Image (spheres, grey):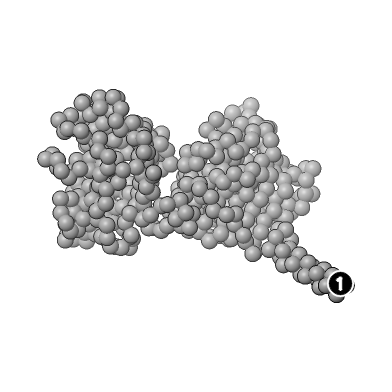
């Protein structure tokens, strides 16, 4: 018995040692609780100080965004910290960020985990500071939008492992982004600029700032929506959520020409993970459709426009009608320069609109510049509720079989098409409108 007890004790010590190497002993503090050693300030001149084991940031009028930056860069890591704001000021946590003399005069730029106590409630979302803008607005994960508790200490957890960035607030999964633009950079605590003198003196506090950089163990996968910016890639959590590639990034598998059995023999170039409306010789191939029909689904796609370009993504496409391959259309258009944007009624032919039926209500700067990638999404629920999304914003919604929907049709170019858009399912179509448009990351999740 004595020998067994000794062996058991030794085993327990060994197990505790292994557990410590991958567990609690692997945490390193980024703040000593006394001063700002290991940190430096960049850009604005907001006030930072160490006080009562906390870092306190205070707003200063007429200053740009200020950042307290780690002197060390970090690639793969898990970061945890507590923060509290007693006002409605905006803030954020920079990760894998940079400041370079040749980029915007040293402006801090890179991934930012949002701190947003305003009614918008986008805390935990992922923003690309001074670069691409919003990558993951919390509209993508509305059920988590109130995890942040105003006026209280909030526990943030940020996992950066490979190309995966996940955020958590108070244990709730928030944003999930797959992106490889910046694999390494500093961590920073932001004090946002203020526009009014009376907002000077507002504070944000951080404490218990710790990081792991080895033996990283991410939290289990969950059901949060994933924004995957890697071309034509499906991540592990997307697979778990039932997302599939609708275009594999290299072949015409699963697609054919409209009213045809085969894929067009010309047009529709496929190169470097891009699906282009025209091929390398500038030839057209006509519209293409999925071989399969779809009813309820979440369809995602990225599109990039060229000057004055026009295209569209149609759904519930019916090839049996005499009016051509008609279907409900998510408009894809150069709103500024293509004349179709000014036709129709009240802007219902602009990008992300339900073409010729319902105009998209796009916030300012929702559209990316010509030559940049936009993220489109169409959600069709089993109860016939439909949503159009553009770059993280829901820009319209309607009920497909409702009286108001039928009223829209009665005033449109589709008024003479019997049961337009009312089928139980249909093909998804990419439109060849003779202009060069690029697509990638075409994905679908069927809803039951």
Q: Position of residue 329 (x, y in %)?
A: 26, 40
Up-down relation of residue 268 to residue 91 (above or below): below
Q: Position of residue 16 (x, y in %)?
A: 76, 65
Give SS at disc 1. Answer: loop
Single out the residue that lies furthest toward the right. Answer: 2
Q: With 316 as the anchor, is 184 left or right in this view?
A: right
Q: Position of residue 402 (x, y in %)?
A: 30, 27
**Residue in view at x 64 percent, y 26 percent:** 198
**Residue in view at x 28 percent, y 28 percent:** 405
**Residue in view at x 24 percent, y 38 percent:** 423
Residue 212 is at least partly visible in this image? yes
Image quadrant for the C terminus? top left
Q: Position of residue 268 (x, y in %)?
A: 22, 57
Image quadrant for the N terminus? bottom right
What is the crowding at mark 1: few (fewer than 14 residues within 10 Å), some, or many (at least 20)? few
Pick whichever, 316 or 136, lies toward us. 316
Residue 75 image-quadrant placement: bottom right
Pick whichever, 102 or 218, lies toward us. 218
Q: With 333 as the anchor, is 263 left or right in this view?
A: left
Single out the residue that lies furthest toward the left. Answer: 322
Residue 186 is at least partly visible in this image? no
Q: Which residue is mark 1?
A: 1
**Residue in view at x 30 percent, y 33 percent:** 400
Up-down relation of residue 390 to residue 408 (above or below): below
């Amino acid at each position: 018995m004595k020998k067994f007890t000794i062996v058991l004790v030794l085993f327990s010590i060994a197990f505790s040692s292994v557990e410590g190497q991958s567990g609690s002993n692997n945490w390193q503090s980024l703040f000593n609780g006394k001063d700002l050693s290991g940190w430096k300030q960049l850009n604005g001149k907001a006030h930072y100080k160490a006080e009562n084991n906390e870092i306190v940031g205070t707003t200063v009028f007429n200053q740009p965004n200020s950042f307290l930056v780690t002197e060390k860069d970090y690639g793969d890591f898990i970061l945890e910290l507590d923060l509290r704001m007693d006002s409605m000021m905006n803030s954020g946590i920079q990760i894998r960020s940079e400041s370079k003399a040749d980029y915007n005069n040293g402006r801090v730029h890179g991934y930012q985990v949002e701190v947003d106590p305003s009614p918008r409630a986008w805390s935990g979302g992922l923003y690309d500071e001074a670069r691409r803008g919003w990558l993951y607005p919390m509209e993508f994960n509305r059920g988590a939008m109130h995890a942040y508790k105003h006026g209280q200490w909030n526990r943030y957890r940020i996992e950066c492992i490979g190309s995966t960035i996940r955020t958590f607030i108070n244990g709730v999964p928030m944003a999930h982004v797959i992106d490889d633009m910046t694999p390494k950079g500093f961590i920073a605590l932001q004090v946002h600029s203020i526009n009014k003198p009376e907002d000077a003196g507002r504070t944000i506090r951080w404490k218990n700032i710790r990081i792991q950089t080895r033996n990283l163990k991410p939290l289990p996968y969950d059901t949060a929506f994933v924004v995957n910016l890697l071309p034509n890639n499906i991540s592990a959590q997307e697979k778990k959520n039932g997302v599939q590639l609708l275009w594999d990034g290299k072949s015409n598998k699963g697609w054919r020409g409209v009213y045809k059995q085969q894929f067009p023999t010309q047009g529709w170039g496929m190169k470097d993970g891009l699906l282009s409306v025209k091929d390398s010789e500038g030839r057209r191939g006509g519209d293409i459709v999925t071989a399969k029909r779809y009813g309820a689904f979440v369809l995602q796609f990225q599109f990039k426009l060229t000057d004055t370009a026009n295209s569209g993504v149609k759904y519930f496409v019916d090839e049996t009608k005499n009016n051509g391959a008609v279907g409900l259309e998510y408009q894809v258009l150069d709103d500024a320069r293509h004349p179709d944007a000014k036709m129709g009624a009240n802007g219902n032919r602009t990008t992300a609109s339900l073409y010729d039926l319902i105009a998209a209500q796009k916030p300012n700067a929702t559209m990316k510049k010509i030559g940049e990638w936009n993220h489109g999404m169409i959600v069709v629920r089993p109860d016939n509720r439909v949503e159009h999304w553009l770059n993280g914003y829901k820009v319209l919604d309607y009920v497909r079989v409702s009286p108001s929907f039928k009223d829209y049709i009665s005033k449109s170019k589709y008024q003479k098409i019997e049961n337009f858009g009312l089928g139980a399912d249909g093909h998804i179509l990419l439109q060849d409108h003779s202009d060069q448009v690029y697509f990638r990351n075409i994905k679908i999740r069927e809803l039951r």
